[in-house]
Amino acid sequence: MEPLTREQQIEALRKNLTVADQEKICARHHIGRATYYRIIQAFDLKNKVMLDIVQLAEANKQAADQRAEQAAASLKKLL
């Protein structure tokens, strides 16, 4: 499997973050939305804000995967 391109990584981040997550990160780091988007576009993993964004996106992805597994298991029980 090929590694994801920078654009694909950025899209994956955006897919796994909600508006509430964005607001939480902006408030926590005292930055505006424009700065938030610039940080994501730069995709600099040395930036503390970017690390926080990646960690939150990963946590959201794991939670979504877990909910999907639980839903599948629940459907199997019903059938």
Image (cartoon, grey):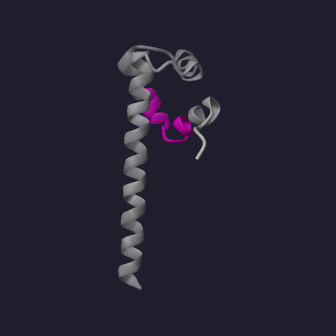
Q: Give the residue drawn at x 58%, y 47%.
A: 1
Q: Give the residue drawn at x 38%, y 83%.
A: 78
Q: Give the residue drawn at x 55%, y 36%.
A: 14
Quarter of the view holding residue 4? top right
Can residue 35 be found in the magenta stretch? no
* Magenta stretch: helix, strand or loop mostly: helix
Quarter of the view holding residue 30? top left
Q: Is residue 8 above or below residue 43?
A: below
| Residue closest to the far front | 1
Q: Is residue 46 above or below residue 74?
A: above
Total labels drawn: 0
Camera-nearest residue between 58 and 31: 58
Camera-nearest residue between 74 and 47: 47
- Horizontal arrangement in the rendering, residue 11 relative to residue 23 (left or right): right
Residue 15 position in % (x across, y down): 55, 41
Residue 72 position in % (x across, y down): 42, 70
Residue 34 position in % (x across, y down): 57, 17
Camera-nearest residue between 8 and 3: 3
Q: Give the residue drawn at x 40%, y 24%.
A: 51
Q: Is residue 19 above or below residue 47?
A: below
Q: Is residue 17 above or below residue 25?
A: below
- Horizontal arrangement in the rendering, residue 26 relative to residue 41 (left or right): left
Q: Which residues are magenta?
A: 12-23
Quarter of the image where the C terminus is located: bottom left
Can residue 14 be found in the magenta stretch? yes
- Horizontal arrangement in the rendering, residue 47 relative to residue 14 (left or right): left
